[in-house]
Amino acid sequence: CNDDRMREERDSVDDIYGSRDDMPVSVTSKVGVSTDELRDLLAEDHDVFHFVGHIDGRGFQCPDGVLDAATLDAVNATTALLNGCRSHDQGVELVKTGASAAVVSLSDLFNSGAVEVGETLARLLHHGFSIGSSMKVIRNYTSIGNRYVVLGDSTLSMVQYSGLIPVLCHVSTDPNNRETIRVRPVAHPTSEIGIGTTFQPEIFENDRYYIAVGEYDTARIERSDFRDWVSNEYEPVILNGELTWGGT
């Protein structure tokens, strides 16, 4: 990890967490905190504690030393995102001490890959995906997502999805008609969706309803209609096998 990487990810996720007009979020960013300050921050009530920095076998590296999570008396952050090298053991201690879940790394990370994972996780969580669903997407569609795991309760969501259930659309061009887009929605579970809930993806124009979680039929729509559908939505989209975002 280097300071440029930490600065890039910090600035990016600050913008992401504050990007939804329908879901006011209070974002506090701290830089260069001491061991005592970090201990206090972890003891405060937070929905998400997103750490970007250096972690080694001894603990969190701070300007004045190292804080080992095993020495903490209390952790009141609901979810901890530890985006540092080999953060697994520190995440285990956070969950033992009070965090409901932690996203941690299993190995060393390279800078651009760690930024990609941090930004993608922030986007998905802020869009309403659960931690478990977010990590499934990250493992499949980011460069080093397979180096991360979830500890604790993977069903947790940071915010409520603006619709009924978060959907990841798999999009490709129809080989027989370049002006037609093929869209296959995949709905991801949240703790708020009960067994048997029915759902109609917005992209479909028919009256057919589906069981809420899982893959749905492939819809074929005009390219212009699809562009209009995603232009005003911060939707995650798998476009020809790669993760991208509507509205960008």
Image (tube, rainbow, N blue to C red):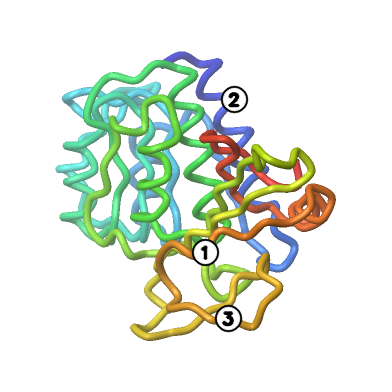
Does 68 sit above or below residue 187?
Answer: above
Where residue 136 appears, as percent x and y from the top left, is: 36, 47
Amino acid type of disc 3? Answer: Arg
Query: Which structural element holds mark 1?
Result: loop
In the picture as drawn, the residue positioned furthest to the front comes out as: 176
Q: Which residue is mark 1?
A: 217
State which quadrant residue 52 falls in. Answer: top left
The residue carrying pointer 3 sits among few (fewer than 14), some (14 to 19) or many (20 or more) residues within 10 Å by Cα, namely few
Amino acid type of disc 2? Answer: Glu
Does 2 sit above or below residue 161?
Answer: above
Mark with earlier residue (1, 2): 2
**Residue at (57% x, 53% y) in the render:** 169
Question: Between residues 144 and 197, which one lies in front from this camera angle?
Answer: 197
Where residue 233 appears, as percent x and y from the top left, is: 73, 56
Q: Which residue is mark 3?
A: 208
Question: Between residues 23 and 28, which one lies in front from this camera angle?
Answer: 23
Q: Which residue is mark 2?
A: 8
Query: Which structural element holds mark 3?
Result: loop
Q: CA distance from mark 3 to mark 1?
A: 10 Å
Mark with earlier residue (3, 2): 2
Query: Which structural element holds mark 2?
Result: helix
Question: Between residues 140 and 93, which one lies in front from this camera angle?
Answer: 140
**Residue at (29% x, 56% y) in the render:** 101
Amino acid type of disc 1? Answer: Asp
The residue carrying pointer 1 sits among few (fewer than 14), some (14 to 19) or many (20 or more) residues within 10 Å by Cα, namely few
Where residue 82 appears, as percent x and y from the top left, is: 35, 38
Q: Which dot marks residue 98? A: none
Where residue 130 appears, as percent x and y from the top left, is: 41, 60
